[in-house]
Image: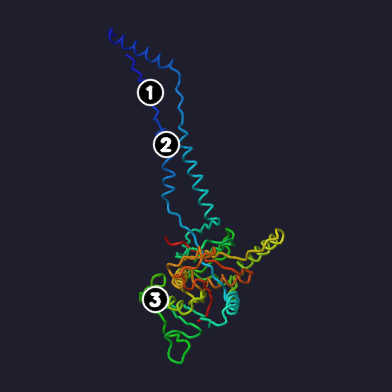
Amino acid sequence: MSPEQEAFLAKKKEKAAARRAKPEEKGELGMTSLMDIVSILVVYLLKSYASDPIVINPTAGQKIPMSSADAPVQDGVPIFVTTRGITFDNKKIVTMTPDGDIDPSQVQNHLIGPLYDQLAEEVDKAKQLAERTNKPWNARVILVGDQDLKFSVLVDVMYTTGRAEFAEYSFCVIRKS
Amino acid sequence: MPRKKMEEEDIQANLLPVMNIMFLLIPALLMAMEFASMASINVSPPKFAAAAQQKDEEQKKDEKPLNLKVFVMEDGFRVSADGQQEGAEAGKSQDSKAPTIGLAKQGAPLNDYERYDYAQLEAKAKGYKQLFPNEAVVTISAEANIPMQSIIMTMDALAGRTCKIAKALKGEQLPDDCYFWQPIVEGGAG
């Protein structure tokens, strides 16, 4: 080994020893930007929930009709009616035919049996709660429909909700910008 | 001669600036997102609306009721007031053959929601409103297979497409560009 090589190796060893002796540096996360984010998110979410007390989550594939109406959605019982079925309380209770009509076995003289049963149960609960809290029962139903929903289906749903003692109806729409 | 062992050095990428940018990007994107804002159209079934109308009639004894009805058909709108269809043959109250307002797009399929002449319907509603300024109720019915979007657009046209009633519902005065904004949905009425 030549003296240059020996000197080079000695220097390398020295450097490695110095590196080992050096204390480990601790990485620190910048918390300021994280705090900025969290504050912005909190304000944004608070604002969204304050302006829209009722949150309507459409079912998969549902195309809510568009309208120029600007009246806010009032408190009520939502019923999701699409060309594939009727969903109430997160359960699909009525199925449709491929043509978009209600399954004939589930409707009789415009009365949709499974929907009526569910609504009647809901009405009983709501009435009992209203009695206990001494507040009037809000007999409003929010119909969250679909752009392609047939008028005949809409009428059947309205008739059924009417039979279940709901007296006020709101059609949920997406406000045109 | 033994091979030289390469000493591996651990290289750590400094992720802090990237994380800072990412965290700032999240709210920026959230703010840029477009959320669908929901609204509602309050409709009444026939029997409740009839009761409301009786009450109105007591209040406005001098005024003859309009009883505006709009029937949405596959080939247009049939408009009638006080039981008399506009454009019906002489001596007939209704003419099931011809609509009062034809289609804006002849031959368009039912799922083309712009097939109806909403502008003409709105103009007609404006005309009726000038004659009956205290009326706000309209009865809407349709053929079985008319899609809901067409019904909603009919309601918009009858209410006035620039009509904003949110403030009026809170007690402010109703804007002048609101015509028939209280729809009654009636099934199977022709």
Q: How many marks?
A: 3
- Sort mark 3 into few (<14), some (14-19) or many (20+) by Cα contacts within 10 Å: some
Circle nearer the viewer, 1 or 3: 3
Residue B95: x and y, percent?
45, 86
Q: For residue A129, which numbered disc appears in the image?
A: none
First along the sequence among labels 2 and 1 = 1
Asked which secondary structure carries label 2, the reply is: helix
First along the sequence among labels 2 and 3 = 2
* Chain under callout 2: B
* Chain under callout 3: B
Relative side of A133 to B31, left or right: right
Residue B126: x and y, percent?
43, 75
Q: Could you tell me the amino acid type at mark 3? A: Gln
User: What separation in Å lies between label 1 and label 3 (alpha carbons)?
Assistant: 78 Å
Q: Which residue does the image show at 53% across and 48% down from the upper left?
A: A46
Report whether mark 2 lies on the same chain as mark 1. Answer: yes
Q: Could you tell me the amino acid type at mark 1? A: Glu
- Sort mark 2 into few (<14), some (14-19) or many (20+) by Cα contacts within 10 Å: some
Quadrant of the image occupied by residue B109? bottom left
Q: Which residue does the image show at 51% across and 59% down from the upper left?
A: A58
Q: For residue B120, which numbered disc appears in the image?
A: 3
Q: Could you tell me the amino acid type at mark 2? A: Asn
Residue B70: x and y, percent?
47, 78
Asked which secondary structure carries label 1, the reply is: loop
Q: For residue B9, which numbered disc appears in the image?
A: 1
Furthest residue in direction top, as rendered:
A3
Q: For residue B20, which numbered disc appears in the image?
A: 2
